[in-house]
Image: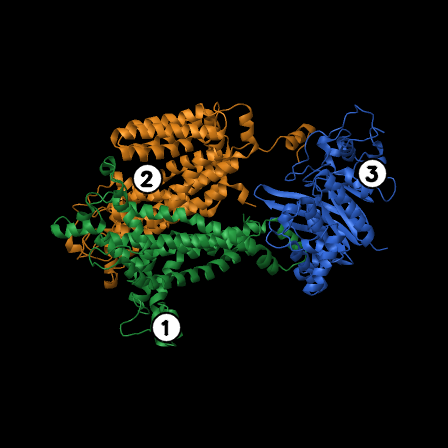
Amino acid sequence: MAEITPQDLFVTDFAVREHRSLWVDAWRRLISSNTARLGLFIVTVFVASATLAHFFWTYDAKTDLDYALKLKPPNLRPTEEISTIHPFGTDKLGRDIFRRTVHGGWNSLRVGLVAVTISLVIGVLLGLLAGFYESMEITQGERVLLQGLVGLSLGGIIAWIGAQWVIALLFGLLGVLSIVFGKFLAGKPVRIALFALGGLLIGGGIGLLGAPMVGLVCGLLGAVLGAILASPLTGTFFSNVVMRAMDIILAFPSYLLAIAIVAFLGPGLEKGMIAIGVVGIPIYARLARSAVLSVAQKEYILAAYSVGEGHDRIIFRHIFPNILSPIIIQATMGLAGAILSAAALGFLGLGAIPPTPEWGAMLGDSYKYLSSGAWWAVLFPGLAIMFSVLGFNLLGDGLRDALDPKLRV
Amino acid sequence: MARYILRRLISVIPTLIGVTFVIFMFQRLIPGDPAVAMLGEHAAPENIARIREQLGLNRPLFLDRDSLVQGDLGGFFDSQYVRYLSRLVKLDLGNSIHRRIPVAETLGLRFPATVELALLSMLIAIFVGIPVGIISAARRNSLIDGVSMMGSLVGVSMPIFWLGLMEIMLFAVILGWLPTGGRLSTGVQIQSITGLYLVDSLLTWNIPGFVDALKHIIMPAIALATIPMAIIARMTRSSMLDVMQEDYIRTATAKGLAERVVLFRHALKNAFLPVITIIGIQAGTLMAGAVLTETIFSWPGIGKWVYDAILGRDYPIVQGGTLLIAIIFVFFNLLVDISYAFLDPRIHYD
Amino acid sequence: MTPLMDLKNLRVRFHTDEGMVKAVNGVSYAMEPGEILGVVGESGCGKSVHALSIMRLIQTPPGKIESGQVIFNDRDLLKLSESEMRHVRGREIAMIFQDPMTSLNPVYTVGFQIVEALKLHKGLDEKAARERAAELLTLVGIPGARQRLDDYPHQFSGGMRQRAMIAMALSCEPQLLIADEPTTALDVTIQAQIVDLVIRLQQELGMAVMWITHDLGVVAEMAYKINVMYAGYIIERGQVRDIYKKTRHPYTIGLLGSLPRIDEPPGTKLVSIPGLPPDLLALPTGCPFYARCTYRVERCLEENPSLEEADGVEHTVACWRWEHIAGRVSS
C-alpha cells in the first residue's frame, strides 16, 4: 500500500464524492439497466428504420399493385414462380408486406409524436396553471386578466343571444373593473349588488335595442353575471373549471372516445392524431397539476417567493424543472399508447386512408384472409406494432427507475 | 358514511351531464350535412328529409338566435339539445338509420353478451393479475418476478385485436380446437334467464350448452383480459413494494408475525387501494376494448354492433353505444370511490 | 450472573450500487437482565442498524449480517430459523421505532394491532386479549382505554401513538425492549413524558431496555451504561457517571461539549466537532475519527485502536491516547 499522508485522508474524508449532474446520473442509471437498454435499442431501430425508409427508400403506395403476386407466403430467395424477394410475404393486392411494414413505421411514429405533442403541450400548460393557481395566492394583475376573460367569455354568450358583440366587451370590462375597484367598494353584499346592477343595465340596455324579451333575458343574465364577477375570484375557481373539464374527458374510456370522435369526423390519419391527442390531454393536465401541488409546498418555492421572484419565473425556473421527470416518463409511455390507439383506429378503418401503409390498417385489410391460411399478412404488421410499443414501454419503465431515484431501494 | 356516499353520487351528476353533452356534440363533428353523410350523396331526397326530421336537424342546436331577437323564447324548448336530453330521460336513444329500429332496444338485447364477455375477462384479469403481482413483490428480483414483469410489459404492448387474431390462427385455424367466432354453435340452445350463457346453462344444468358457450367465450375473454391482467399485476406489485417499505410493516414483523401474515394481513389491505382504482378503470376500458375484440370474434355484443355502425355511418347507434359504455365507466369509478370508504378509515366522510 | 444478551463481533454490510457500505464493524458487548443501556452516536453511526440486526429485521438484500453472534438466553439468534426467530420477536425482544406516525398500520384499529400480538404470543382468545389490551393502554397512560381500542391510528396524536406502540411492545412482557430513537419525532414535553413512562415501566416490569438516541442528555437521566458509537464501531463504553466525569474518547468529549449545560457560566461557547463522519463506503485503515480529531498522532493514521480497559473493567475506550485525555474539557 502506498504511503498515505494526512492530506490524502482529508481529501477522501471531506471532499464529497465526485460531483455529477442529475441528468448524467440518471443516464448512467438508465443504461445500467438491461430492460432499459433493450427498450432503447428497439426504439432506436424503430425510429431509424422508419425515418430512413421515409427519406431514402421511395415507395408510392398508389401504384403498388400486382395481382399476380396476390397473398404469397414469405420467400427469402427468388423462385421460378416469384422472381422478387418478399421476406414477409405479400398481401391481397400483391404488395410486399416487408416494404409496407417498414414504411408504416413512419406513419406510426408520426401519429405518436403529433398526438403526444398535442396532449403534452395543452395538458401540461393547463395542469401547470391549474396547480399553480390552486396552490398560491394569485396577484392583482393576474386576477384582472382572469376575471376579464371570464367576463368576456360569459358576456360572449349573452352577446350571442342578443346579437350584440358590444355586450361581450362591456362584460369583459365589468370583470376587470370588479377587480380593480372591488377593494374600494365597501362590503361584499354592497359590491355584489352594485355589480349586479351594472350587469343588469349593460345586458338589459343593449339587449333592449334588439327586442324587449331579449332585453329582459339579457338583463337577468347580466345581473347574475355581475354578481359572479363581483365575488372575489380565486385561483381555485380557474383550477376547478379546468379540472372539471378534464374529468369529463376522463369519463370516457380513452380510446373509445378517440374512436367515437373519428367515427364522426370521418377517417384519416390526421384526424386520428388529433383525436388521440385530445383524448390524452387530461392525463398530462392531472400529472402536471398534482406535481405542482406537491412541489409548491416545498421550502425552495417559499424561498423563491421570499426573495421576490415573479410568478412566471417561479413556474418556469423552479416548478417546471421539478415536474419534468414524471412528464418525460408519461410522454414515453404515451408514445406507446398513441401507437396502439392509432393501430386500433386503423384496424377499424378509421385511421389512414388506403392505400397508405399503416400497421393497423394493414391488419384490418388482411385479417379476413387468416382463415384461408395467410398468416404472414397478419403476423408481421402485428409484431411491428408490438415491438415498437414494447420498446417505448421498456424505455419508459427504465426512465422511471432512472429519473425517480426515490422509488429505488 | 351515508353522507359520503351520497356526496359521491351527487358529484356524478355534472359528469354525466358533461358526458351527454360531449356525445350530443359528436353530431357537430360530422363534416357537411349529417343526413347526407349517413345516407350518401345519391340518396333519395325524401329519405334525407326523413333523417333530417328524425335527428331534428332542421331545429336549432340550443337556441335560435333570430327567434330570440323577435322575443320568442319557446324555441329553446324545441331545440335539438333539449329534445335530445328529454329523449334520454325516457331512455330513447333514437332509431337506427338503416334498420329503423330503436337503438335502446337493440342495445338492451345485445348488452348481456358484452357483459358476459367483460365479466369473465375481468375475473381472469383479477384472479391472475393480483396473485402474480403479490408473488412478484414478495420474491422481488427473482426469476419469477423478472419473467412475470417482462410478460406483463409484453401484455400491455400487445394490440388486443392482433392477439385475438393470433389466438384464432393457433387454436382455431391450425389446431382446430376452438371455434373462430360467435357465441354458440348452430343448433345449441340455451334457455335464457340472465342472458349470460355460462350462467344460464349451469342454472338449467345444460352441460353441452355450457361447454359450447365456454369454447366460444374463452378466446375472446383471454384476449380482452390480457391488458387489464398485465396492468393489475404491475400495479399490485409496485403498490405492494411501496407498502412493504413502510414502517408499520417492520412493526408487524417485529411483533413476531409470520411473513405470510405480514404480507396478506398488513401489506395487502394497504396496497389494495391503488389496485382497486386500476381495476375500476380497467373495468370501463374493458367495455371499450370490447369494440375490437367482439369485431374479431364476431361476438354479438354492443362492440360488434358499434363497429358495424361505424362502417355504416349509423350515427345514432354509435352515440348510443358510446353513451352506454361511458355511463358504465363512470359508474365503475363511482364504485371505486365508494369502496375506498370501506377500505381506508382515513377517508373523511364529511 | 449470565448476561441476558451477549453480542460478539457483529458485522453488518449493505451492498449498494455505489459499493459496500460497512454499517456495523465488529460490535461486542453484553447486557444484564433489567439493565438500561443507552446507545448514542450521530446519524449513520450504525446504532439503529445494529439494533435491527439483533431482531434480524435488516432488509436482505441489500443488507447482510456478515458475521458475529447474538447470544440471547443462551442461544445465538443469528443461527435460529426464521420461524424460531418469530417466537423471539415480540415475545422475548420487542422494539419501538422512531416515527410513531408511520409505525402503526393505518387500516387497522389500535386495539386490533395490540390484540394481534397477544393472541399470537400469549394464546389468549379475542375477549381476554381485548381485556389485556385495554389494561396495557391504561398502563401506558391512555385515558378511556377501552373506548380507544376501536380507534384508528390517525385518531391518535403523535405522543399517544408512541404510547400505543409501547403498549404493543410490552404486551408479551419481553425481557428486552429496544427503543430506536422513540422520542426524536415528538415534541420536547412529550419526549420527557415518554422517557418517564419507559423508566416507570422498566421499574415495574423489570425488563432490560436498550435506548438508542443521538441525545446524550436523555440517556444520562435513565441509563446505567452507555455505548458511544462512531462509524459502526463502539468507541467508548462505560457507566454513565464514568462517561460524563472521566470521558476518555475525543469524540465523546465532542458529543458532550456540544450539549449545553445548566451549571456552566453564561457565555460559555458550545464545542462542536469539526467535519463529517467518514464515508462508510471507504473507511480509513486507521482510526475512523482521525480526520476530525484534535489529539491525533501518526499511529492513529495507520492502526485502528480496539476497545481496551481504561479506569477498570466497566469503562472501555478505543483510542491510542486515552491516557492523555482526561475528563471533560470544561470541568
The residue under label 1 is which amino acid type?
Phe
The span from disc 2 to disc 1 (Cα, nearest Å) is 48 Å
Tell me if label 2 and label 1 are in contact, CB under 8 Å: no
Answer with left or right where residue B146 lies relative to residue B325: right
Subunit under mark 1 = B
Subunit under mark 3 = C
Name above or below for residue C60 compared with residue C307: below
The span from disc 1 to disc 3 (Cα, nearest Å) is 82 Å
| Chain C drawn colour | blue
Q: Mark 1 highlights which residue?
A: B210
Direction right: furthest residue = C312
Q: Mark 3 highlights which residue?
A: C243
Q: Nearer the viewer, mark 3 or mark 2?
A: 2
On the question of residue B92 being in view, the answer is: yes
Q: Residue A45: percent from the left, percent from the top?
A: 35, 44
Q: Secondary structure at mark 3?
A: helix
Subunit under mark 2 = A
Q: Residue B254: percent from the left, percent from the top?
A: 67, 54
The span from disc 3 to disc 2 (Cα, nearest Å) is 70 Å
Q: Nearer the viewer, mark 2 or mark 1?
A: 1
| Chain B drawn colour | green
The residue under label 2 is which amino acid type?
Val
Residue at 84% over, 30% down: C263
